[in-house]
């Protein structure tokens, strides 16, 4: 069944990014695959009054089931509204986003099932092919008032089920032509972040190329930039995983102060998945190790959800600067007459 996102209470990313550019913060884009992750994301963002992008990869959409997912998006909005009314706090804007869409057909399918925002990731393609595919998706999306993220440059690590050994940094001289020709609403760039828990090699200083970001910003001032691969890989979670039977060695993430600096600039959306995976796994391992008699999933998934809540709360307040920004976006979305 086709459904437009507005009927589900979801919003596209336009007003969020306009506020992020004006206010020097980044909107959190947290990945989810299941109910507990979604609950933690939405509740942490409501509590901190942050706008939020809940995002799913192609794999997550297959895992959770595309029909169920559309209802989860709608359910997230309805839960948020009910909780806001019960707690006497303001509602927050929620965008459901396709992360790393790899084809026109996948983007079209998401748009038809109520996504207000999609990413078409043609970053592995030659420049001209990436621009042509991105243009095609943007044309379709904009007919439905859906916002589109494109990507230029390739992150090291695993992206789109393709492993790249080294970064291909975004070439600032290409960005103006790309955003003009494709009509995208935001652009993901490659400046040294990467997906997963192993972002830097042993002995390497964890550092991203804020100089490239600065050059991109100079060439397309005020244009919303997206950072993928932005987990910080909390050492406490890695230690807990290893203490309770895991084997994660040599993991490293993006230092929080570098993400703070990026969020103050043209970076409007910061993607975080691995940190949530680590925190959730750490708590589940701890409980199963300390209470071997336990077999009710609520007894380990519930505490894991609590741990995720704290993680997202802290990110919004102390890293992205998105806490307290929802009210101005809600006013903009309601329009001048009701503002
Ligand atoms: O960028 C990738 C995200 O972390 C999603 O990963 O494809 O394993 O769901 P996934
Ligand atoms: P992390 O693996 O650093 O969390 O990155 C997630 C991401 O970029 C999702 O698109
Ligand atoms: Zn990504």
Image (cartoon, helix red, strand yellow):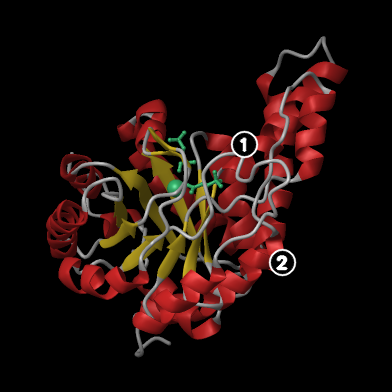
* Other-residue count near label 1 (Cα within 10 Å), few / some / many at <14 / 14–19 / ≥20: some
Find numbered disc 2 in the image and state the secondary structure of the residue it sits on.
helix
Is ligand 2 closer than 8 angstroms to the Cβ of mark 1? yes
Seen from the viewer's position, the closer of residues 53 and 47 is: 53
Per the image, the residue denoted by label 1 is 277
Q: Across the whole image, how many numbered discs are drawn on residues?
A: 2
Q: Nearer the viewer, residue 232 or 337?
A: 232
* On-image quarter of the C terminus: bottom left
Whether the residue carrying mark 2 lies under 8 Å from ligand 2 is answered with: no
Instruction: Determine which quarter of the picture holds residue 171.
Output: bottom left
Q: Position of residue 187 (x, y in %)?
A: 35, 64
Residue that appears at 46% across and 65% down: 93
Residue 192 placed where, x, y %?
A: 53, 56
As displayed, is residue 29 above or below residue 90? above
Measured as percent of width and height from the top left, residue 333 is found at 38, 76
Q: Is residue 42 left or right of residue 243?
A: left
Identify the mark at residue 318; answer none if there is no mark: 2
Instruction: Give how far across and how far down residue 332 sits, in percent.
Output: 40, 81
Question: For the residue labelled by badge 1, is the local secondary structure a helix, a strand or a loop?
Answer: helix
Residue found at x 39% / y 40%:
57
Locate residue 301 relative to residue 283 in the image: left or right: left
- Answer above or below: position of 163 versus 333: above
The answer to whether the residues at label 1 and label 2 have Cβ atoms under 8 Å apart is no
Quarter the N terminus occupies: top left
Name the residue nearer the viewer: 196 or 124. 124
Horizontal side, residue 266 vs residue 116: left or right: right
**For marks 1 and 2 on the same chain, the one whose residue lies earlier in the sequence:** 1
Marking on residue 94: none
Q: How far is disc 1 from disc 2 in space, using C-alphas?
A: 20 Å
The residue at the far bottom in this view is 337
As drawn, is 148 to the left or to the right of 205? left
| Residue 74 appears in view | yes
């Amino acid at each position: 069944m086709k459904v437009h996102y507005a009927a589900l209470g979801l919003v596209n990313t336009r007003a969020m990014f306009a506020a992020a550019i004006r206010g020097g913060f980044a909107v959190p884009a947290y990945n989810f695959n299941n109910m507990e992750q979604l609950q933690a994301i939405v509740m942490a963002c409501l509590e901190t009054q942050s706008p939020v992008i809940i995002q799913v990869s192609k794999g997550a959409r297959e895992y959770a089931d595309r029909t169920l997912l559309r209802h989860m998006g709608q359910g997230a909005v309805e839960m948020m509204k009910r909780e806001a009314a019960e707690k006497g706090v303001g509602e927050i804007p929620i965008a459901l986003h396709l992360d790393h869409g790899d084809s026109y057909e996948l983007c079209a399918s998401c748009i038809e099932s109520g996504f207000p925002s999609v990413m078409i990731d043609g970053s592995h393609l030659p420049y001209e092919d990436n621009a042509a595919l991105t243009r095609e998706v943007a044309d379709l999306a904009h007919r439905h008032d859906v916002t589109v993220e494109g990507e230029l440059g390739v992150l090291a690590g695993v992206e789109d089920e393709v492993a790249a050994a080294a970064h291909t940094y975004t070439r600032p001289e290409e960005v103006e032509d790309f955003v003009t020709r494709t009509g995208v609403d935001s652009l993901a760039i490659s400046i040294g972040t990467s997906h997963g828990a192993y972002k830097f090699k042993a002995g390497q200083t964890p550092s991203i190329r804020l100089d490239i970001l600065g050059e991109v910003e100079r060439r397309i001032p005020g244009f919303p930039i997206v950072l993928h691969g932005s987990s910080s890989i909390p050492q406490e979670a890695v230690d807990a995983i290893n203490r309770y039977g895991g084997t994660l060695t040599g993991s490293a993430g993006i230092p929080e102060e570098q993400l703070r600096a990026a969020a103050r600039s043209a970076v409007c959306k910061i993607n975080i998945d691995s940190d949530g995976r680590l925190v959730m796994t750490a708590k589940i391992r701890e409980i199963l190790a300390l209470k071997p008699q336990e077999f009710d999933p609520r007894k380990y998934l519930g505490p894991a959800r609590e741990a995720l809540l704290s993680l997202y709360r802290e990110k919004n307040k102390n890293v992205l600067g998105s806490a307290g920004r929802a009210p101005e976006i809600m006013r903009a979305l309601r329009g001048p007459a009701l503002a």
